[in-house]
């Protein structure tokens, strides 16, 4: 695992961040975002969007990371980097689906056991590894 993936897994398993928080908070410092702000904003995104089983929270954290890194941040010209960011998000989604067959929490095979589930740890690790590779 790379540094970002190690950090995300640590935040998920040891600090008990949700899957989305673990991935996005692993990149906050590098992009000048207060970790507390990202942590608070993404609290509802774990377990497939607040436990709904929709888009995996780790994937959402991955998409947020790519957006944070790629956006020009020009609110007067919001389209400047938008299509390139969308392209990167689609590529990241495909990379994640190759490993887990789906982007949806409810469709990703889960093992039974204590929290955090090994399958969720793998999702966090894989999402962070994809982010790390794409942000390099």
Image (cartoon, rainbow, N blue to C red):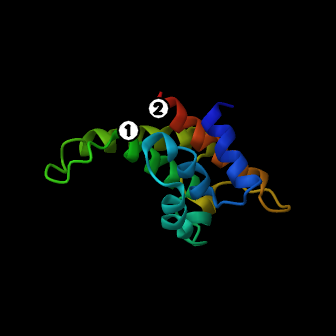
Residue ID at (56%, 51%): 25
Residue 104 position in % (x across, y down): 55, 58
Residue ID at (46%, 32%): 135
Residue 59: mark: none
Residue 134: mark: 2
Q: Nearer the viewer, mark 1 or mark 2?
A: 2
Residue 10 position in % (x across, y down): 72, 47
Q: In which quadrant of the rendered view does residue 44 lie?
A: bottom right
Residue lying furthest right in this view? Answer: 113
Dot 2, crowdedness within 10 Å: few (<14), some or many (≥20)? some
For mark 1, give the secondary structure: helix
Q: In which quadrant of the rendered view does residue 43 lie?
A: bottom right
Residue contact between numbered discs 1 and 2, judged by CB atoms under 8 Å = yes
Residue 6 position in % (x across, y down): 69, 39
Judge whether 67 appears above or below 21 on screen.
above
Distance from Cα at disc 1 to Cα at disc 2: 8 Å
- Residue 102: in sight, yes or no? no
Q: Nearer the viewer, residue 14 or 101?
A: 14
Residue ID at (61%, 72%): 51
Nearer the N terminus, badge 1 or badge 2?
1
Q: Which residue is mark 1?
A: 88
Q: Is residue 2 left or right of residue 57?
A: right
Dot 1, crowdedness within 10 Å: few (<14), some or many (≥20)? some
Q: Is residue 23 left or right of residue 10?
A: left
Q: Nearer the viewer, residue 132 or 14?
A: 14
- Residue 34: in sight, yes or no? yes
Q: In which quadrant of the rendered view does residue 52 lie?
A: bottom right
Residue ID at (45%, 51%): 33
């Amino acid at each position: 695992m790379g540094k970002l993936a190690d950090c995300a897994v640590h935040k998920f398993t040891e600090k008990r961040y949700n899957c989305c928080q673990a991935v996005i908070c692993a990149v906050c410092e590098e992009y000048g975002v207060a970790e507390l702000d990202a942590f608070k904003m993404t609290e509802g995104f774990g377990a497939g969007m607040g436990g709904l089983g929709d888009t995996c929270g780790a994937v959402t954290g991955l998409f947020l990371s790519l957006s944070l890194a790629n956006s020009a941040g020009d609110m007067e010209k919001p389209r400047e980097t938008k299509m390139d960011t969308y392209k990167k998000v689609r590529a990241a989604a495909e990379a994640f689906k190759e490993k887990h067959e789906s982007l949806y929490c409810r469709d990703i095979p889960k093992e039974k056991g204590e929290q955090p589930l090994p399958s969720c740890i793998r999702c966090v690790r894989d999402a962070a590894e994809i982010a790390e590779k794409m942000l390099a």
